[in-house]
Image (tube, grey):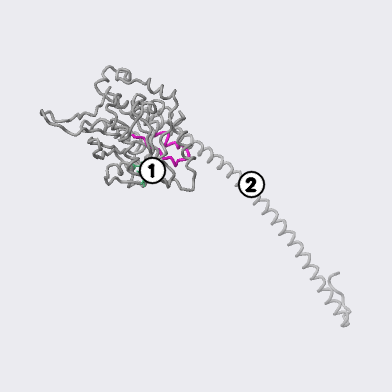
Amino acid sequence: MVQYTHQTWPDGSGGHIVNVAPREHGIGGAQSTYPPQLPAHTAQRARSMPSTPSEILESSTAGSSWVSDVPRNSPQEEGWTTRPKISILVMGGTGVGKSALIAKLTGSPVKLGHTLQSCTTQCKGWNYIHESNTTVTLIDTPGFDDTVRPDMEILASIASYIRDPRHAPPVGVIYMHRITDKKMTGASRMNLEMLRAVCGEHYFQNVVLVTSMWDTIPAARPLSEFEAREAELMASTEFLGDLVDKGANPRRYLGDGPSATQIVDVLCNKHQAPPLKITLELSRSMQIEDTTAGRILTAELRKREKKRLHEIEEEREEERMLRAELAETEAKVRDNERRLRAEIERERRARKRQEDAEELQEHRGRNFAIKAAMIAAGWTGHFGDRR
Ligand SMILES: Nc1nc2c(ncn2[C@@H]2O[C@H](COP(=O)(O)OP(=O)(O)O)[C@@H](O)[C@H]2O)c(=O)[nH]1
Ligand SMILES: [Mg+2]
C-alpha cells in the first residue's frame, strides 16, 4: 500500500509515491518520486476546500448522500459480514487508455483500441478485489468525442449507470490524458469540461488525474520534455491546474501493474466521498439536459450547429461567387468566340479575294500565251477581246 505524508498532498492523504517504473524509459526508478511537490499556497487553498456536505451542497438534503466504503447492500442478518464494495468512474477521451488501465487492474478481457468496433460505446463495470479486500468496480466510459454516439447519450448512460441502485456510487473518478499529446485538442477540452461538470469542485479531492503512455516515449526523446509538459498540465488553470489546486491527485500510468495499482490506491484510501455534482442535480428532479454537464453539451451542440450553418453560408457564398465568375468567364469566352469567328470570316474573304485575283491573273496569262502562240503561227485575225 502506498504511504502518504501530510505535507505533500492537498487532500491530506497523498504523498511521495516512489515510482517503480522500468529505468530503460527513464521514468521513475528507485530515486525518482512522483509527482512534484505542490506549491505551499496550493496546498493551503486545497485544505480550505469544503469538507462537509453542508459546506459543499446548497441543498440541505445533501448530507445523507455521502458515499462511504461501508457496503450499501450488505445482508441485514446479524453476524454477517460482506466484503466492502466501491466503484470508480474512469473518464477521458477516446484512446487515452481507460480500457487498458482497467484490463491491467482487473485482468478482464476489456476491449481496447481505436476502431469503431472495439472502442467502448457504453458504460460497463469491471470488478476486481483490491489488496484491502475491497471489491472495486471500475466503470469504463466512452469518451465525449465518440463518433458512434452523441455526447448527450454518453452523459445519460454515465448518469444512469451511477444512479442505478444496484451499483455502488463512485468513491472517485480517474481521469486519463495521454502525456504524448502535444496539445490539448478540442476533444480533450470537452472531456475535461465534462469531468468538471460531472464531479463538481467539491469532488476534486476524489479525482485522480492520470497521464498515460509514459512507457511509449521513445528512448531517444528526452524525458524532461514530457516532465515539463506534465508540470504545465498540472499547474496551468487552462488545463488541470484548477483541479490540482482543489485537491485532485496527479499520477502516472506506466503501462504496468504497480503504477496502475498506485492510481486506485489513492481512492481506496479514501473512506468517504461526497456525491457527484450530477448525482445531486439529478436527485433534484433535473433532466439530464438541465444538469451542468448537459447544459455544456447543449451549448456545445448549438455552437457546432451555428458553426456548421456559418460554414454552409460561407460555402453558399463561395458557390455564388464561383457561379458569377463562371458566368463572367462564359460571357468572355462567347465574346472571344464571336471575335474569332468574325476574324476567321474576314480572313476567309480576304483569301477568297486573293485566290480570285490570282485565278484571274492566271487566266489572263494563259490567254496571252495562246494569243501569242496564234500570232506566232501566223494568225492575222482579230481577237474578240482586248486583253
Ligand atoms: N503502451 C501503452 N499503451 C497504452 C497505454 N494506454 C493505452 N494504451 C493503448 O492505446 C490503445 C487505446 O487504449 P484504450 O484503453 O482502448 O483507450 P480508451 O478509449 O481510453 O479505452 C490500446 O491499444 C492500448 O493498449 C499506455 O499507458 N501504455
Ligand atoms: Mg475504451
Question: Residue 177's x, y, as percent?
Answer: 40, 38
> Magenta includes 199?
no
- Crowding near the residue tagged with mark 1, few <14, some 14–19, many ≥20 C-alpha atoms within 10 Å: many
* Residue indicated by mark 1: 21
Q: How many marks?
A: 2
Residue at left 36%, top 38%?
A: 143
Location of residue 286 in the rendering, given as x and y in whole percent from the top left corner: 29, 24
Whether 185 is among the magenta residues is yes
Q: Toward which corner of the image does residue 279 lie, by quadrant?
A: top left
Q: 12 above or below 254?
A: above
Q: Secondary structure at mark 2?
A: helix
Is 230 placed left or right of 285 in the picture? right
Dot 2: within a 10 Å radius of its alpha carbon, few (fewer than 14), some, or many (20 or more) residues? few
Q: CA distance from mark 1 to mark 2?
A: 72 Å
**Rendering coords of residue 306 (x, y %):** 45, 32
Residue 332, label in figure = 2
Please state, as top left, top right, bottom left or bottom right, where the N terminus lies in the image. top left
Magenta residues, as a range? 174-191
Q: Amino acid at mark 1?
A: Ala
Question: For numbered disc 1, what is the local secondary structure?
Answer: loop
